[in-house]
Amino acid sequence: MRKPFVAGNWKMNKTAAEARALVSEMLPGLRAVETVERVICPPFTALSTVAELLAGGPVGLGAQNMHWEASGAFTGEVAPAMVKEFCQYVILGHSERRAYFGETDQTVNRRLKAALAAGLTPIVCVGETLQENESGQTYKVVSGQVRGGLEGLSVEEVGRLVIAYEPVWAIGTGRAASGSDANAVVDGIIRPTLQEVFGNAAADAMRVLYGGSVTGANAAEFFQMPGIDGALVGGASLKPADFVKIVQAAAQ
Ligand SMILES: O=C(CO)COP(=O)(O)O
């Protein structure tokens, strides 16, 4: 049985002061849903403030990216140990980082190995663009991202990460995939790829989330699907009532 998992990716939103107010508003509702692993991923600048609010409680904290080197002359970057000081999780390979900041499967792979070595739980994002989807390349793209991103990992390491399937055309557009279409990619592409590379048990145990225009109103459609274990939520994770509703739906 895979434990349901819901993470809120705040992207580049909220100052530390705003984060304090937002987390305080959603925390009682999040705390109450014990059967779901729930995680908040604010910007780097708010991590220390939010870590204080979450300390000792059941809600996890994640960063949205991380560099692979331990330290050094990498202006503007944040090292694994710096993330680990405050967080238990880190989002890697988000499509916005792939599209705007030159992230590739190779750099995702380096970050992933560094995150695992630091004892973080990585949330690795994969997903095809609209053009790739419409030209029939979804299998090639998503399978390639899983293979390339996870290359060289041991089965034990694969057991410590979470995958998020986020079709790029569904992110921030209000046009979510249907539950069955998302499930077809998760159980028809992502798990079979994991099975080929890491074996049956690793593929079966992997928690795979759906992300892309998930709201309190449509979340249940995804969570009913046999292959989908939760959600990576963008816009709706900034709305306390909506985010709590999504976490509650994952517990059903
Ligand atoms: O990119 C996402 C989460 O990482 C999804 O964003 P939206 O929920 O705003 O579509």
Image (cartoon, grey):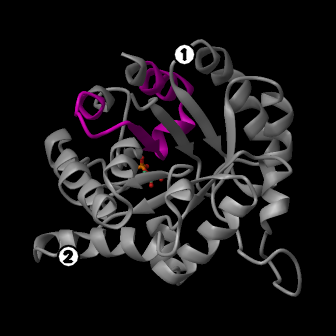
x and y, in percent, of residue 239 in the image: 53, 32
Left-right relation of 162 to 199: right
Q: Is 240 contained in the magenta span?
A: yes
In three-dimensional space, the C-alpha distance between marks 1 and 2, rounded to whole angstroms, equals 38 Å
Residue range (magenta): 221-248
Q: How crowded is mark 1: few (under 14 residues within 10 Å), some or many (20 or more)?
A: some
Please report contact status of discs 1 and 2: CB closer than 8 Å, yes or no: no
Q: In which quarter of the image is residue 126?
A: bottom left
Q: Nearer the viewer, residue 94 or 158?
A: 158
Q: Residue 33 carries which label?
A: 1
> In this rendering, does residue 139 appear at all?
yes
Tell which circle, 1 or 2, labels the residue nearer the N-terminal end.
1
241 to 135, vertically: above or below: above
**Residue topped by disc 2:** 131
Which disc is residue 68 wearing? none
Q: Is mark 1 within 8 Å of ligand 1?
A: no
Which numbered mark, 1 or 2, is in the foreground of this view? 1
Is the C-beta of the residue carrying label 2 under 8 Å from the nearest atom of ligand 1? no
Residue 219 is left or right of residue 246, and the answer is left
